[in-house]
Amino acid sequence: MRVLPVKRISRDTETSSALERQHAELSRAIVTGGHSLVEWVEDATVSGAVNLWDRKSLGKWLKEPLIHSWDALMVTEQDRISRNDLHWSAFVGWVLEHDKTVIVLDDPGFDLTTSRGRMMANVKAGLASDYREAVSKKRRNQTEHFRAMGYWPGGVWPFGYRAVRVETPEGSRWKLTPDPVTSKLVLEAYDRIVSQEWTVSAVVRDWNQRNVMSASDYQRHCNAAEGREGVKTELRNNLWNQQNLKAALRNPVLLGHAVHKGQTIMGPNGMPSLWADPVLTDSQFEALQKALDKRSRKVTTKRTSAPLHGIVFCECEGAYNRSQGKTRNGKAPLYYRCRKCDRKNSFPAEYFERVVFVLVTDKVGHLEIMNRTYVPGVDHTEQIKTLREGIERLTWAIAAATSKAQVEAITATMGQHSETLAKLEAEPVIPGRWEETGTGRTFIEWFGANLDPTARGDFLRNLGVRITISKVTEPMVGPLEFLEIDPNEVGVTVRAEWPEDLAVRISGSVGSSKVSTDSQS
């Protein structure tokens, strides 16, 4: 008989042997029964409540064309097939309709071809379904209790936090606390996106180049470093992308809020329930969300190896593209050409790139690179907004109260919120500010030490520099001795457009930039 052995487990951990045990038992049964193995089917970490046809591994064997390649489905226990009585009934009807056989190793008398056999199997399916419902209800109640008490219910740590064991009156519980490594990365992303106007994709590229671990990999790394058992420790080496970084930076848990399905959980006092101390202040989180919204527009960019792509343009407004010339003496020289205008302006690539770099250093080379620290100000706008919303929710709660004691408790809470609100509204708003300290190093010193043309081009694109170059009959005037090229060799005119805050951008891109942890708010 052509047998399809099926393994399933709801929760798969590093120390779990359930899948290995199922594999061994099914292997022995196939050999002992003289069956033909079709293919192993394994659904790890798949709940018994998931419909069979929706399972990633098993589902495809219940559909065309694989449905004809096996005769019997074999499992170690019936509940490995399903823990949902309705799904089980549908599966039994499908088995009979398609003339399939089901073999359950711990039930030698299992038989779906008789009414008595189906009845016994349905009873077992009902018991399994009841058990699953009881476990799910217990887990939901436990999760709700943990949220109410501010305990961490488990799972992947929110980026910026880690779970630590604390002793409580109920015993040992998990609590979230800002992680010393990832909380600094959150502040770094905030500073770059909000203050330095980095794009999310630029942060992603930088983090991947620096091998910054994803949230799940970092947790697995910590599990392995701490020697924890029963948890996942093998790194998956997932890279950062715009989607998972945005999700991490939009998570209200960065405010310390308890969160369910991306939404803040409100407490009985009308205020957000808290899991931990905040990584970002209310004003920082709000500014970050606005910056992410601003950068949410989809921009399609063409990848190119040309260092000056998107920086240099012809007088006809056409962009210069880098291309290879005809091969001579085994070499194919590179040129920058404007393909838009009739002149077909063309320059040797090395000369072209060096002229631009000299132009930039001549403009900003004297500037000193500064270390910049952002000092958050005092702004309780978001806290005031939250308190007002909390008071409004409590006002509605009074209307729904069913006893005098409830009304008195809610009224007392409203009084506390009103007192706090009055204090916050009385405090002045102090804007955040940048504090700069000199490094004693000029930009030309930094630029001279970074000779890679591609890296220089990326830097200039981030600065927002736009340079227009066109040929003329007169020779170029400028410090071409630095290029070691005869200034009379090629005549060009150059017109550059510099951002108004060029000095600030250079300082923020080259120097050290951080967010002060000594917040006034």
Image (tube, helix red, strand yellow):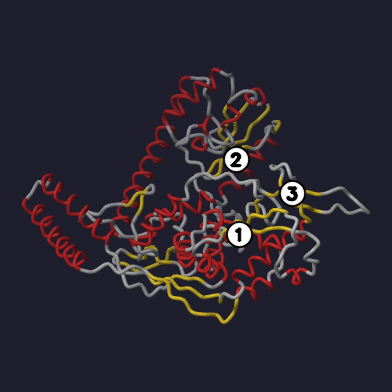
Q: Which mark is residue 496?
A: 1
Q: Which one is closest to the eye, mark 3 or mark 2?
A: 3
Is residue 498 found left or right of 452 in the rendered image? left
Q: Residue 276 carries which label?
A: none
Outermost residue, front side: 474
Circle 1 SS class: strand
Q: Which quadrant would residue 487 be assigned to in this image?
A: bottom right
Amino acid type at circle 2 is: Glu
Q: In which quarter of the image is the C terminus?
A: bottom left
Of residues 76 and 398, which is closer to you in this image? 398
Instruction: Give the Cα distance between marks 1 and 2.
Output: 62 Å
From this view, report whether residue 42 is shown above or below residue 103: below
Of residues 266 and 28, which is closer to you in this image? 266
Read off the residue under disc 3.
345
Read off the residue under disc 2.
42
Circle 2 SS class: strand
Instruction: Give the Cα distance between marks 3 and 2.
Output: 63 Å
